[in-house]
Amino acid sequence: MRKGSKQFETEAIRTQMERSQNLEHSSPIYMTSSFVFEDAEDMRASFAEEKERNIYSRYSNPNNNELIEKVCKMEGAENGFAYASGMAAVFSTLAALLDAGDHVISSKSIFGSTHTLFTNFFPKWNISTSYFDVDDLDSIEGMIQPNTKIIYAESPTNPGVDVLDLEALGNIAKKHGLIFIIDNCFATPYLQQPIKFGADLVIHSGTKLMDGQGRVLAGITVGSGELMDKVYRFSRITGPALSPFNAWVLSRSLETLAIRVDRHCENALKLATFLEGHDKIEWVKYPFLKSHPMHEIAKKQMKAGGCVVAFEVKGGLDAGRKFFDSIELLSLSANLGDSRSIVTHPASTTHSKLTTEERLAVGISDGMVRVSVGLEHIDDIIADVEQALG
């Protein structure tokens, strides 16, 4: 631990904005659209950026600033910006850094909406994307073009919980002068800090484990001060800022992130182990199972395996449908990272906009099930899955 720094859990709890004249113990909510100035000169200097202060909540707000500072400390980042959703963070970060004619290299295994962004929307601005397989990082250098600007990936991936070697990706990006961006949503800053492995920017959907109770939508990007300045200037103009109330909720949630994620991971590993030995399961994938193809890399760059387990029920689509219809305790929802366990069918929900060929190319079969393992007692979670399989 470097001099002056504190442990993760302490920073998560004790990183707070300055107290007001009321000397509150917990940070207040600043539900205000704008802020006032002392006089004409104060107003001029503030808009000229000669002063660092809050002007308008689309630009910054004390609650958003507190959240950003917490996540920056957790990730080892220099600066950040908080967004109204995870996809607002993904789009704004990429749009701020890409120009017409640029090229992106991305993992094939990414969230469905991010894939749609690359294939349906960025081509309108003459921005192209090449995809690499998660198990073939050696192919990346052959994809690099003179106009390549960004390497983008998730690890672990959504929904197949594949793990990518972040250090190898970071080395490729550094060698070729590319911006390396990681979606760290599945791991959270508690389990993994991609900047340590060479990432320039890290993106989160705060909607997931950061909130942890399925209450608010949020996103955040943190990383290099130089790159974040470009992202900030794009974002303050285009207006995707997080609301102060949601920022306040997330700041409170981050105080318990470590203890919650520890239990999520403990439960997820137990469920994955149970499924791996079940005669009605075709396969199961979880980063901290020894059977995971990238188990050693996962142990190298993650504290634990996360909350998501992927598996396939034997019998294909019909067996999968029967499993979903038989679930009683777990929720059928497209969210993840909730205190309540959730089962999702990616092929018909989160990745339904992909063609069958595109889904199969990234390991999403028609019968794949994604379980976001919650905080209920593990015996009850396993009992529900077991009866649904039976």
Image (tube, rainbow, N blue to C red):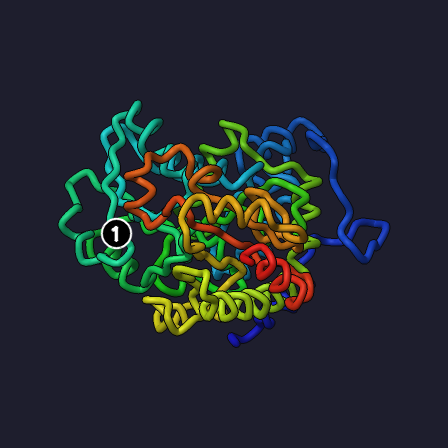
Image position, residue 182 (x, y; %): 39, 52
Image position, residue 6 (x, y; %): 60, 71
- Please tell me whether residue 123 is drawn above or below residue 380 in the rendered image: above
Q: Residue 353: which quarter of the image?
A: top left
Q: Residue at x 68, y 61 (%)?
A: 376
Image position, residue 184 (x, y; %): 46, 54
Residue at the farthest right position: 22
Q: Is residue 385 left or right of residue 353?
A: right
Say how many tags the image has.
1
Whether residue 206 is visible, yes or no, is no
Of residues 235 and 219, the one drawn nearer to the viewer in this rendering:
219
Residue where numbered disc 1 is placed: 133
Image position, residue 211 (x, y; %): 64, 51
Q: Is residue 356 left or right of residue 65?
A: left
The three-letter amino acid code for the residue at tag 1 is: Asp
Q: Residue at x 68, y 66 (%)?
A: 377
Of residues 160 and 164, the one drawn nearer to the viewer in this rendering:
160
Of residues 291 and 313, the one drawn nearer to the viewer in this rendering:
313
Q: Residue at x 34, y 61 (%)?
A: 166
Q: Is residue 134 left or right of residue 321?
A: left
Of residues 8 and 345, the one drawn nearer to the viewer in this rendering:
345
Tag 1 secondary structure: loop
Residue at the farthest top position: 124
